Image (spheres, coloured by chain):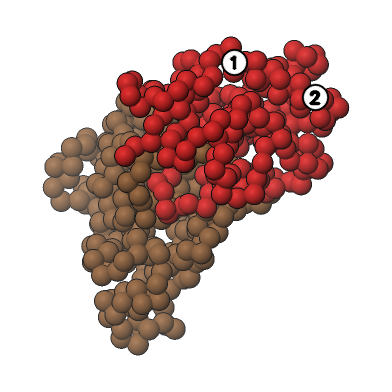
Amino acid sequence: MIKHLLSIDQLVPDQIDLIMRTADSLREVGTRTIKKVPALRGRTVCNLFFEPSTRTRISFELAAKRLSADVVTFTADAKTSVSKGESFRDTAQTLQAMGVDAIVIRHSSSGAPVLLSKWVDASVINAGDGLHEHPTQALLDLYSIRERFGSFEGLRVGIVGDVVHSRVARSNVKALAKMGAIVTLVGPPTLMPPAVETWGVEVTTDLDEVLPKLDVAYLLRVQTERMNEKLFPTAREYAALWGLDRRRVAMMKPEGLIMHPGPMNRGVEIASNVADLERSIITNQVTNGISVRSALLYLMLGDTAVSDEDSEEDIDG
Amino acid sequence: MGVPGSPQPIPSGERVKARVLEAEDMSRALRRIAHEILEHNKGIADVILIGIHTRGVPLAERLGSEIEEIEGQRPKVGAIDVSFYRDDIGIRRPKEISPTELPFDVSGKTVVLVDDVLFTGRTIRAAIDALVDFGRPDTIQLAVLMDRGHREIPIRADYVGKNIPTSANEQVRVHLAEIDGSDEVVILEGQA
């Protein structure tokens, strides 16, 4: 397995399959009375969050704890060394000196995880960097789709809404395409990234036209906090054109799924009564996130000091 | 229950040192072990067979069928994967993980762990650790098709198909029809 996970680009389909299968076993662990295995006992995982996050941070924390790793959390809020002016590099060197085995980083600057991976010996996992990528979100989304459909080949996935501000969309487009799904981006032109035509996916503004063809409608959060200018007139107008409401759900295939990376803006990209439908697997995505992140930690940290011995040889005893 | 695991071809030529068990030998050994399990536990009330992935799983299924033929009743059969409990994580490349399936309570039961080869004993140590996370069996016993010696921890088998002397660098390959297409056990020369 790879040492760092910085981008979906690093993974080939076989590795993604292995992560999914390993996640199956870790999901089973999550159903036990004792939801914990000793695999990473004595290892330390550091959550290094320069941007606010609830679900991703807690998800990684539970994922590490399911494997018995120790977890420390560093958030760049008022009480930490960052507020005292410590540079990113010095923070990295401090963690390096403390000897952590993995660093899960979220940062508002694209590329911060790549820099970090050059400074430390620990495995670095990108938990969202600027407008670049959020690879573990894409992996848990793949896992949630696989859970319902079994495979990806030929599945049509529509990623709807605020694509330009979405690292989730960037990682998902790459991951889904790798696995053989057909992706369509849907939304207002002001929320489409520049040069989107080079992404190799279909792009449209007409949600009603594509909805009946989709196996998955993946709604992105409208990220008003990242918008410096008005990119659409009002939330109401956005909801009328690109929000998923009951009327639009009725146009979907009966088995079509609704997904959202969270946190949701109910009433904007997704109607409240749609978010709670059975076909909306938003809470499954959250549950699966723990298993998928556990699988990654196990595969990345469990494979560090590898001997060249073929593991298929007789290690049974 | 599914039988995961990919076939391991036996290399042709000089690496095969000896063929130690043919298909008929294997089924006789399993039938004998089934009788021993019954005799030792005075029947199969409260007996559960748990195969250790990969090749312990079909062996446990077969022992279950043998017991069913003798007693007219099939014991519960489960599967356990010990990957997350191994003591060589980070030292050896992890093997592919298979699903643990224990859809019953093991507390108060007699659990017979089933594996193909008993070697260092480390897999069995991991299996016992994994098992007790699911409950507190009354007794844990161990059945193996082959015991090749070279224990590194104090573990022994209660039921053994065949003891074979080996040198530590040789390999014992068990092939099962369910995974590999045929039943046989061979010893391979160690790699230089």
Disc 2 target residue: B38
State which tag comes first along the sequence, 2 or 1.
Answer: 1
Compared with residue B36, is residue B181 higher up or lower down, i.e. above or below? above
Image location (x, y in percent) of residue A235: 37, 54
Label 2: few (<14), some or many (≥20) within 10 Å? some
Task: Determine the CA span between mark 2 and mark 1.
Answer: 20 Å
In the rendered picture, chain A carries what hue? Answer: brown
Image coords of residue A229 (percent x, y): 24, 64
Callout 1: chain: B
Amino acid type indicated by mark 2: Leu
**Position of A262 compared to A6: left or right?**
right
Tint of chain B: red
Q: Which mark is residue A75?
A: none
Residue A127 placement (x, y as % from top left): 36, 59
Residue B187 appears in which quarter of the rendering? top left
Q: Residues within 10 Å of mark 1 (few under 14, many from 20)?
A: some
Report whether residue A237 is seen.
no
Q: Which residue is mark 1?
A: B25
The local secondary structure at tag 2 comes to helix
